[in-house]
Amino acid sequence: MLPDSSLAKSGQINVAKFADTAIKELVQVLVKEGARMPFLKAKLAGGAQMFQFASGGI
């Protein structure tokens, strides 16, 4: 999952791929399936900078 849909290339985006769009979509689907908003809770954990490379290294 990527943090922000603004990172998407042009064209149609996969809403499940980006945190800012996937969370909204997930809540909409849960409510549609009968979940009640006051009872929903979210626990989010941070990610890593997967592609940060050391400069001048290997």
Image (tube, rainbow, N blue to C red):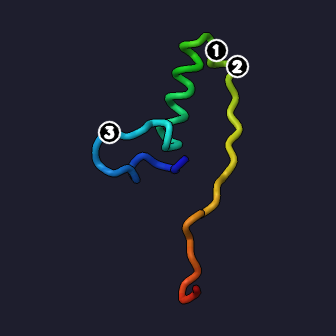
Which amino acid lies under the numbered mark 3 shown in the image of this protein? Gln
Q: Is 37 located above or below residue 15 in the figure? A: above
Which amino acid lies under the numbered mark 1 shown in the image of this protein? Ala
* Residue at mark 1 to residue at mark 2: CA–CA distance: 8 Å
Which amino acid lies under the numbered mark 2 shown in the image of this protein? Phe
Q: Nearer the viewer, residue 39 or 48?
A: 48
* 14 left or right, relative to 19: left
Residue at the limit of the structure toward the top, as seen here: 34
Dot label at residue 39: 2
Q: Whole-percent x and y of residue 12?
A: 32, 39
Q: Whole-percent x and y of residue 19?
A: 53, 43
Q: Which residue is mark 1?
A: 35
Quadrant location of the C terminus in the rendered image: bottom right
* Residue at mark 3 to residue at mark 2: CA–CA distance: 32 Å
| The image quarter in which residue 37 lies | top right
Q: Which residue is mark 3?
A: 12
Q: Give the label, 3 or 2, closer to the camera.
A: 3
Could you say whether the residue bearing mark 2 is in a helix, strand or loop? helix
